[in-house]
Amino acid sequence: MFDLLMAAGLALAAPAAAESTVTFRTADGCLIEAVFLAPAKGSYILVNTHGLGSNRGEWGPLQAAAARRKHGYLSLDLRGHGGSKSCGGRPADYRRFNRADWAAASRDIEAAALWLKKKGYAPGRLVFCGASIGANLSLKAAAEGTVKPAGVILLSPGLDYAGVQSLPYIRTGMLIAAAATDQYAWRSSLRLRDAAKEKKFLCDFLDGSSGHGAGMFSKPGFIAALLDWLPGL
């Protein structure tokens, strides 16, 4: 009896899953650094990709809210950003990227999805989530990669960011969020929504009120509404 009580006490005292820093390599030799939190059984994993010149730290508010709902996340530093500073054994710096370099960055997300698949996570529990150019890259990775996510979340996508387009890569259901004050992203988002509906894909729209990309997290209720979308996939 005492042993059973002790076991129950230890189970209750078991700490929650901890975030860890991980690395993985892309098909073209870039070493990508990311932070990972495992989900509870049956929950989703958000594969988060930041905007140009930013880093994975911008996802902090979403990560905290996702963890409270027992979802996991893999938030990466794109090549040339944050802790991801090596490609093919050479230094990588986004400030020197050309259009071809930006187009290749979708491989970072593809590599993230493959890393999760090798860990045993089903593609149907993955959701690619991107901000600004990260949104375009997430859509591109979902279309071109071998691991197909359950859906994508696009925060302030554009029709074209640094040569990375969005309209050609509509291949899955999506949630689009943009603020009317962010005129280019807003107009682009409306075009994307209409194109997705024409192709008969699930496409919901969330008004971000103000801000660009992760800057919309400050709107009360925005993150909750974003996470509320996941069970509908």
Image (cartoon, grey):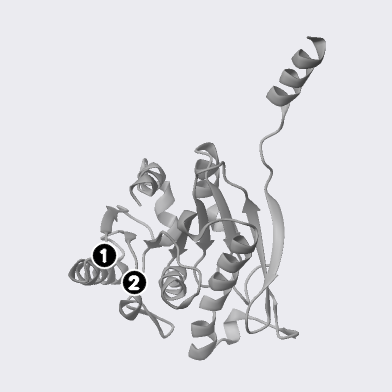
**Gap between marks 2 and 1, in whole Å?**
8 Å
Identify the disc placed on residue 191.
Answer: none
Q: How many C-alpha atoms fall within 10 Å of the one at disc 2: few (<14), some, or many (≥20)? A: some
Quadrant of image for the N terminus? top right
Relative to 218, does residue 77 appear above or below in the rendering?
Answer: below
Q: Which amino acid does label 2 sit on?
A: Arg
Question: CB atoms at circles 2 and 1 under 8 Å apart?
Answer: yes
Residue closer to the observer: 229 or 57: 229
Rendering coords of residue 216 (x, y %): 39, 54
Left or right of 165 in this view: 32: right
Residue 199: x %, y % from top left: 22, 71
Crowd tier of the residue under label 1, counting other residues whose Cα lies within 10 Å: few below 14, some 14–19, many 20 or above: some
Residue 157 shown left or right of residue 24 in the figure = left
Residue, x 63% and y 84% (percent of image)? 28
Mark found first going from the N terminus, 2 or 1: 2
Q: Which mark identifies residue 171?
A: 2
Position of 40 relative to 110 (above/below):
above
Q: For this view, does 61 lie left or right of residue 157?
A: right
For the image shown, how many numbered marks are present on the structure?
2
- Which residue is at a point 58% across and 59% down the rendered structure image? 75
Say which residue label 1 marks: 201
Instruction: Describe the element under mark 1 as helix, strand or loop.
Output: loop
Label 2 secondary element = loop
Q: Which amino acid does label 1 sit on?
A: Phe
